[in-house]
Image (cartoon, rainbow, N blue to C red):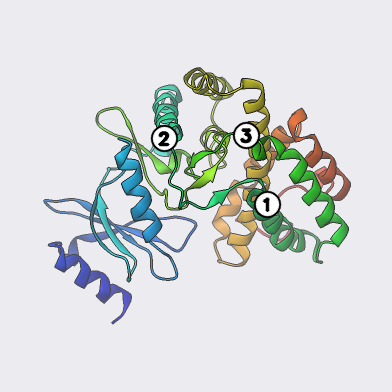
Amino acid sequence: MNRDDLIAVFLARNGYAPSDAEPLAQDASFRRYLRIRGDRPAVLMDAPPPEDVRPFLRIAAHLRGLGVLVPAVLAADETQGLVLEEDFGDDLLSVLLDRGDNPNPFLDAAVDALVVMQRAAPPDWLPAWDAPMMSSTAMGTLFDWWWPAQFGTPAPDAARDDVAAALDAMLEPVATGPKCFVHRDYFAGNLLRLPNGQTGIIDFQGAAIGHPAYDLVSLLQDARRDIPEASRSRALDRYLAARPDLDPEKFRAAFTACAAQRHLRVACQWVRLARRDSRPQYLAYGPRTWRLLQDALSEPAAAPLAAALDRWIPAALRGNPSGLAP
């Protein structure tokens, strides 16, 4: 039985007509989504193995228990990687921001939801998104994908060792800071405005335990769209006002470190998506991501990484590799 037949059987078993399904969206993984029209609208997540929907289901249950607004799961086939869930509609924050709506109300609601998720004890079965893992993933996209695409040769061991040491030093505020639930992709494309004005949250299957600054970086320094600096500062102030338990100076240092790590990893990840997965369209976000990285590197808290990159990668070469085009 092919994939379309499996989906048709799953939908029919749960009272939906396969003919009512239409493509909705696809993200940077191999998942895809189908919207099911009709009297009971729903969304089908199609995540064929080796994608694993079990983390999504467990995390959804955890977040619902906190009162966080995530889609209700209507049916699931864990073996086949099929999940039928509540349809939250089309009011993605990304769409609202891109059309020029005032970002402040949306960011306020997103910050408030983030605080709720972070204040609760995270499930102990979540994986770690700690300083060693953050360093390893950034090293992987930089040296396994971006470097050979840009220079045509493997990176020298000395460059790897230097950047690894710099990442470890820069991420020290993350390593020694507080830990909480981390969505890991908490940006406008995964957040929706619901009719009650609250924020609906999707695409959380990669959640982990990490530093609270990481998701705030994802929200305020979106690699896919510009958010005005005044709105970013306002949202950061709102977050810190809601978290008097955090040391503001230490948090801002960790925020900078998370920003530099995330932007380096993601800027180079666009290359991996282009070369390995034949998705060159993501390279269109390269210039913005490299610019965000440079902004982070200009902060004192990112000085170790800035110095290491200066030793190995001239500023003029920090961008999409020549020969790769979106």
Side of 321 where 276 appears, left or right:
left
Q: Amino acid at mark 2?
A: Ala
At a point 44% along the width and 22% down the height, the residue shown is: 104
Residue occupied by mark 1: 138
Looking at marks 1 and 3 on the same chain, the residue that comes earlier in the sequence is marked by 1
Q: Secondary structure at mark 3?
A: loop
At a point 21% along the width and 68% down the height, the residue shown is: 10
Looking at marks 2 and 3 on the same chain, the residue that comes earlier in the sequence is marked by 2
Residue occupied by mark 3: 177
At a point 15% along the width and 68% down the height, the residue shown is: 13
At a point 28% along the width and 82% down the height, the residue shown is: 1
Q: Establish if 26 lies above or below 230.
A: below
Q: Quadrant of the C terminus?
A: bottom right
Foreground residue among 143 and 230:
143
CA neighbours of label 2 inside 10 A, class few (<14), some (14 to 19), many (20+): few
Mark 2 and mark 3 in contact? Answer it, CB < 8 Å: no
Residue 292 visible, this orientation? no
Q: Amino acid at mark 3?
A: Gly
Foreground residue among 275 and 243:
243
Q: Give residue 140's position: percent from left, percent from top.
A: 68, 58
Q: Give residue 201's position: percent from left, percent from top.
A: 37, 41
Q: Which mark is residue 115?
A: none
Mark 1 and mark 2 in contact? Answer it, CB < 8 Å: no
Q: CA distance from mark 2 to mark 3?
A: 16 Å
Q: Give residue 225's position: percent from left, percent from top.
A: 53, 38
Mark 1 or mark 2, which is nearer to you?
A: 2
Q: CA distance from mark 1 to mark 3?
A: 20 Å
Side of 152 where 34 appears, left or right:
left
Residue occupied by mark 2: 120
Looking at marks 1 and 2 on the same chain, the residue that comes earlier in the sequence is marked by 2
